[in-house]
Structures are given as structure tokens and as C-alpha cells.
């Protein structure tokens, strides 16, 4: 007779293995539904991580979130959905949870996660005034932690596959200018000319993108900065007649083409179109130059804020608030409304190579689904 303990161990192991297979199958069905989505960067895509931090860069009070499905603030810097939410919509996925959310557990891990934190930039010293934020290299450490947790759920190989086949979004750079170089008390302009500073930001951004590749990313949307000189905050501080502020505009027009080149260079080094540059400056410029033809009454005045152009400080309960968020391009001093975000994501989906290079998101989704 075979020893009962041995055979029962075998039975248990077999049972455990087939249970694991069933779990994998069930998880697999959901996993097939949509690829995982991973989001890194700043307040344009933070969806609540900063709610868990001791920081002044937060959007967890009304009227933030006034048009979100729950009509409550979530930590998103918008009246409703942000760019990342709208990309989730396009790939047929539920919105990612912020990595720091206690709800991000079990099967929710399969959806992906958002590591973004409002206030951060490419450079480590950008946004120090907001105190405790998750700087980009820390976002990457949390992503490694995420991968370990995912492997605990579905095994190493499957986790690796999900990470490699995921869609990635990284949004950085704006804060390095508006919340670093152009701050009234910044020492940077005395140390570096604007173009030398932009060069520094780009060379650090390149390292960041390579690190993301090392961590397993194979399809990454990289956004440039918007037209920085036209945001209500810049208008409030530096515009006399409502014209966009020249030096901040110049920053965006130096930085964005450099980023395009960097992305092209990286792709040819890697021998694959891993990185896709999204020219959000162009999309945003379209409706800033010509708001009426996009259905906006203004692209200069923020819906929620105070001071000239509603551009001083962030939106809060005492701010003046516009009644119809659908006709404003900017929600607060820095961030677009949901409606403007929808236009940006629409260009990401279907834009020509002037907007998305080397290809748009609908092409990416079609190509990747054939692999
Ligand atoms: C920024 O911080 C990371 C991690 O702490 C470090 O590896 C990197 O070298 C720093 N970058 C610069 C330019 O100091
Ligand atoms: C972008 O997407 C549309 C489909 O929506 C497609 O017809 C077009 O060719 C794409 N453009 C590029 C440059 O990939």
C-alpha cells in the first residue's frame, strides 16, 4: 500500500493545481476582455494617489469631481473624467485604481493601476513645494511592488505577460516648467538658459523612459506638455491682454519637438515602436486658438478659481464656479475640463502623425490585437 500521507499530498497538490487552473481560467476570461493599463506621471492623470499623502497638491474637496459619475471629488484634477479614464474607456476597460487605494486587491490588480501623483515632474526637485508626493522613480518602485503582487495572484509567467502586453501612459514635463523653472523665486533661470534647461529635462526624461522599458513596458504613450503659456494660471500671472505668455509658450515649443526626437531615437535603438509621442500641445492649441469652433465660450478663463482668468490658486468651495462645464476648456488654473480631455483623447485615437507619432491609438490597438 502506498503510504496514505504521500497519496493524500499528491491529491491535495493535484486539487490545488486544478483549483489554480480554474482560478486562472476565470481570471483569464476577464483578462482577455481588456489589456492592463498602467499610468505614470503628474496631476493630469493622478486619480487619487495624493489623497493618501500629506501634500498640498490635492483635489479631494468639492467642487472637484462635480461631473464625475458619483458627483464627488476623487482626487482627479478635473470636473469629471481625466485623460487616463477616457483611454480606459477606449480600450474597453474599467478605470484603473490609484495604486495607494486599499481597494486595489485581488482581481482588480488585473485592470492595471495608476501610479501618478500630482505635482511631480521629470526632475527630482520639481514640485518640492507640494511636500510629500510620489516622484517618478518612486512610482517605478511601486510598479515593481505591483508586479510582485500580480505574480502572487496569477503566477510569474502570466504576470510578466500581462505587464509586457499592457498599455502604458506617462504624462510628465509641464511641472518642470510651470512649477520649477518659471516660479518667481526659482534659481534655475540664473543657472541655465531655457533651452539648456529643456535639454536637461529631456535627457532625464530619456532615462525615465528607458527605465520603464526595463520594467517591462512595451507600448507607451508619452505626452508632451500643453501650450504652457496659455493656461489660466500663466495668464493670471503674466498676461496683460489675455495673450499667451511668451516665455512659457517658448518652453513648450522647444520641449515638445525634442521629446518627439527622443522618442524616435529610442524606438530606433530598441528596434521597435515602443514609445508613441502624443502631441497634446497641438491638440490643445487647436481649441485654445479657436475655442468657438470647438463649442467652448472661452479657453482663457478657468471654470473654477479666483482672480484674473480664475487663474490664481486651485479650485475650492469659495471659488467662482461656472454653471456649464461643457463650454469651458479649462476646469481650474492648470487642468482641462472633461470635455477638453475628451477632445485630447479623440486625437490620440484617430489623429494624424502630426498628433500621434509614429501612429495613433486606434492603429496601436489594431496592431497589438493581431500579435
Ligand atoms: C533622481 O532620483 C533617482 C532616485 O532617487 C536617482 O536615481 C536619479 O539619479 C535622480 N536624478 C537626478 C538627476 O538627480
Ligand atoms: C489614425 O486612425 C484612423 C482610424 O481612426 C486611421 O484611418 C488613420 O490612418 C490613422 N492615422 C495614422 C497616422 O495612423
Image (cartoon, rainbow, N blue to C red):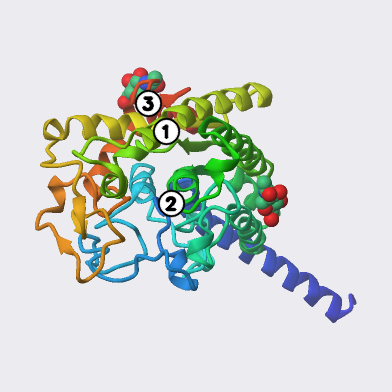
How crowded is the residue under tag 2: few (<14 C-alpha within 10 Å), some, or many (20+)? few
> Residue drawn 49% across and 45% down?
181
Q: Is residue 332 left or right of residue 272?
A: left
- Mark 2 highlights which residue? 184
The nearer-to-camera label among 2 and 1 is: 2
- Mark 1: secondary structure: helix
| Up/down of 79 relative to 84, above or below | below
Q: Badge 1: how crowded within 10 Å, few (<14), some, or many (20+)?
A: many
Q: Quadrant of the N terminus?
A: bottom right
Between disc 3 and disc 2, the foreground one is 2
Q: Residues within 10 Å of mark 3 (few under 14, many from 20)?
A: many
Is residue 333 visible to the viewer in this orientation of the structure? yes
Residue occupying the point 47% across, 72% down: 52
Please give the count of numbered marks on the rendered protein. Answer: 3
**Ligand 1 near label 2 (Cβ, under 8 Å)?**
no
Decide if residue 371 is in sight here: no
Q: Position of residue 223 (x, y in %)?
A: 45, 37
Which residue in the protein does label 1 denote?
252
- Name above or below for residue 53 compared with residue 26: below
Q: Earlier in the sequence, mark 3 or mark 2?
A: 2
Quarter of the image for residue 5 reads bottom right
Q: Which residue is mark 3?
A: 355
Establish whether ligand 2 lies closer than 8 Å to the Cβ of label 3: no
**Alpha carbon of mark 1 to alpha carbon of mark 3: how far?**
15 Å
Instruction: Work out how far the residue at label 2 is from the one at label 1, CA to CA, in angstroms.
Output: 18 Å
Q: Quadrant of the C terminus?
A: top right
Q: Which label's residue is closer to the chain start, 2 or 1? A: 2
Which dot marks residue 30? none
| Quarter of image, res 24 | bottom right
Amino acid at each position: 500500500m502506498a503510504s496514505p500521507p504521500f497519496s493524500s499530498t499528491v491529491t491535495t497538490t493535484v486539487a490545488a493545481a486544478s483549483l489554480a487552473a480554474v482560478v486562472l481560467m476565470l481570471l483569464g476570461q476577464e483578462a482577455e476582455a481588456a489589456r492592463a493599463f498602467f499610468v505614470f506621471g503628474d496631476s493630469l492623470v493622478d486619480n487619487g494617489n495624493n489623497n493618501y499623502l500629506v501634500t498640498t497638491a490635492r483635489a479631494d474637496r468639492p467642487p472637484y469631481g462635480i461631473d464625475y459619475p458619483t458627483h464627488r471629488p476623487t482626487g482627479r484634477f478635473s470636473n469629471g473624467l481625466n485623460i487616463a479614464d477616457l483611454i480606459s474607456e477606449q480600450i474597453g476597460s474599467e478605470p484603473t485604481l490609484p495604486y495607494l487605494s486599499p481597494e486595489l486587491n485581488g482581481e482588480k490588480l488585473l485592470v492595471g493601476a495608476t501610479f501618478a501623483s500630482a505635482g511631480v515632474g521629470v526632475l527630482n526637485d520639481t514640485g518640492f513645494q507640494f511636500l510629500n508626493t510620489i516622484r517618478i522613480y518612486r512610482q517605478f518602485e511601486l510598479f515593481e511592488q505591483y508586479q510582485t503582487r500580480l505574480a502572487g495572484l496569477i503566477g510569474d509567467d502570466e504576470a510578466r505577460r500581462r505587464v509586457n502586453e499592457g498599455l502604458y501612459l506617462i504624462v510628465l514635463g509641464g511641472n518642470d516648467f510651470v512649477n520649477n523653472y518659471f516660479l518667481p523665486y526659482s534659481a534655475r533661470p540664473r543657472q541655465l538658459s531655457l533651452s539648456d534647461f529643456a535639454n536637461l529635462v529631456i535627457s532625464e526624461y530619456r532615462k525615465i523612459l528607458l527605465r520603464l522599458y526595463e520594467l517591462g513596458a512595451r507600448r507607451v504613450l508619452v505626452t508632451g506638455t500643453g501650450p504652457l503659456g496659455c493656461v489660466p494660471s500663466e495668464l493670471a500671472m503674466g498676461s496683460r491682454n489675455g495673450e499667451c505668455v511668451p516665455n512659457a509658450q517658448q518652453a513648450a515649443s522647444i520641449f515638445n519637438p525634442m521629446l518627439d526626437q527622443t522618442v524616435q531615437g529610442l524606438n530606433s535603438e530598441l528596434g521597435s515602436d515602443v514609445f508613441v509621442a502624443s502631441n497634446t500641445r497641438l491638440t490643445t492649441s487647436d481649441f485654445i486658438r479657436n475655442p468657438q469652433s470647438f463649442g467652448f465660450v472661452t479657453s482663457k478663463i478657468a471654470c473654477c478659481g479666483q482672480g484674473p482668468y480664475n487663474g490664481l490658486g486651485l479650485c475650492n468651495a469659495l471659488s467662482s464656479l461656472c454653471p456649464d462645464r461643457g463650454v469651458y476648456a479649462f476646469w481650474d488654473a492648470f487642468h482641462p475640463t472633461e470635455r477638453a480631455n475628451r477632445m485630447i483623447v479623440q486625437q490620440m485615437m484617430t489623429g494624424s502623425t502630426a498628433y500621434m507619432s509614429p501612429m495613433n491609438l486606434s492603429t496601436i490597438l489594431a496592431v497589438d490585437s493581431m500579435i
